[in-house]
């Protein structure tokens, strides 16, 4: 077993960022010690210390899984799109010799606007949340949330958020009925529309069914109008699943 010091970076768009007022220390559920800090560009630098088998690949994979977990949780906790997250380098400690390698870069696209500075109390809360262990279903929902939030196409973002409501039951008519019933129960004020069979459904389910429609008469403006409502309902749904 060897000890590794692995660094990574999490960055946001130029127009919407979060910045840490002071470092954030925590121990992840996998046992690695992690320090998060902001640099001059308001990117979050991740410094991870871990023990792995004598395989560089195993160490880097553990670190990649951890930075993915951190990115998903930050995107969820602060409702912010993640522009990029990646491993930047790692150092393997072998009898006081250090070898530095650079990993592949994974990039994502920009969007949004504003900046949030996290103070001491918020950082303490962030560290507590990052140190918790979550079940696989909840972690999958957070991954889906991050991917939906960073999607630039409003129509596709709408569809991806609705998919979270359908998860983990798949996409079929029975699941769609259950989701629509849940939506209408959560917010009875949501307007109704007629589906293809002439039955009443929420406007959110109607838009989900027609998000790929090509007809010029389709009310594309409703996608933008009701997207915040859908996003808020999805957040409520995920909060219900918090272990």
Image (cartoon, rainbow, N blue to C red):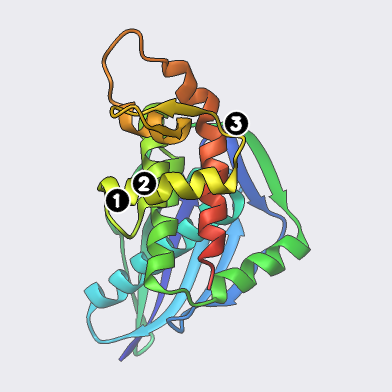
**Proximity of marks 1 and 2: CB atoms separated by less than 8 Å:** yes
Asked whether the viewer can see residue 59, the reply is yes
Binning the other alpha carbons within 10 Å of mark 1 as few (below 14), some (14 to 19) or many (20 upward) gives: few
Task: Judge from the rendering whether residue 233 lies leftward or rightward of residue 146; answer left or right.
Answer: right
Q: Position of residue 173 (x, y in %)?
A: 27, 45
* Picture residue at 33% right of the left edge, 87% below the top: 2
Name the residue carrying label 1: 174
Q: Nearer the viewer, residue 203 or 141?
A: 203
Residue, far top = 216
Quote the CA–CA distance across marks 3 and 1.
Answer: 38 Å
Q: Position of residue 42 (x, y in %)?
A: 60, 46
Binning the other alpha carbons within 10 Å of mark 2 as few (below 14), some (14 to 19) or many (20 upward) gives: some
Earlier-in-chain disc, 2 versus 3: 3
Looking at the rendered image, the quarter that the N terminus falls into is bottom left
SS for callout 1: helix
* Picture residue at 46% right of the left edge, 30% below the top: 203
**Front disc: 2 or 3:** 2
Earlier-in-chain disc, 3 versus 1: 3
Asked whether the viewer can see residue 110, the reply is no
Name the residue carrying label 2: 177
Quote the CA–CA distance across marks 1 and 2.
Answer: 5 Å
Residue 242 in which image quadrant: bottom right
Name the residue carrying label 3: 113
């Amino acid at each position: 077993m060897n000890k590794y010091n692995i660094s990574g970076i999490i960055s946001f768009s130029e127009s919407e960022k979060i910045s840490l007022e002071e470092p954030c220390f925590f121990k992840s559920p996998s046992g690695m010690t992690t320090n998060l800090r902001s640099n001059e560009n308001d990117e979050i630098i991740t410094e991870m210390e871990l023990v792995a088998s004598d395989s560089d690949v195993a160490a880097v994979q553990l670190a990649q899984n951890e930075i993915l977990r951190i990115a998903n949780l930050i995107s969820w906790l602060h409702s912010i799109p993640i522009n990029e997250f990646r491993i930047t380098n790692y150092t393997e400690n072998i009898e006081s010799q250090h070898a530095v390698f650079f990993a592949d870069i994974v990039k994502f696209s920009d969007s949004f606007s504003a900046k949030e500075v996290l103070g001491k109390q918020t950082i303490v809360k962030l560290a507590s949340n990052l140190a918790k262990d979550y079940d696989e279903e909840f972690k999958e929902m957070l991954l889906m949330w991050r991917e939906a939030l960073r999607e630039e196409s409003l129509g596709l973002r709408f569809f991806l958020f609705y998919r979270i409501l359908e998860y983990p039951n798949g996409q079929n008519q029975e699941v769609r009925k259950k989701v629509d019933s849940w939506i209408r129960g959560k917010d009875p004020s949501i307007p109704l529309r007629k589906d293809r069979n002439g039955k009443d459904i929420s406007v959110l389910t109607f838009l989900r069914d027609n998000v790929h429609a090509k007809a010029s008469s389709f009310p594309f403006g409703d996608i933008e109008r009701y997207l915040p409502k859908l996003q808020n309902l999805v957040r409520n749904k995920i909060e219900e699943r918090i272990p």
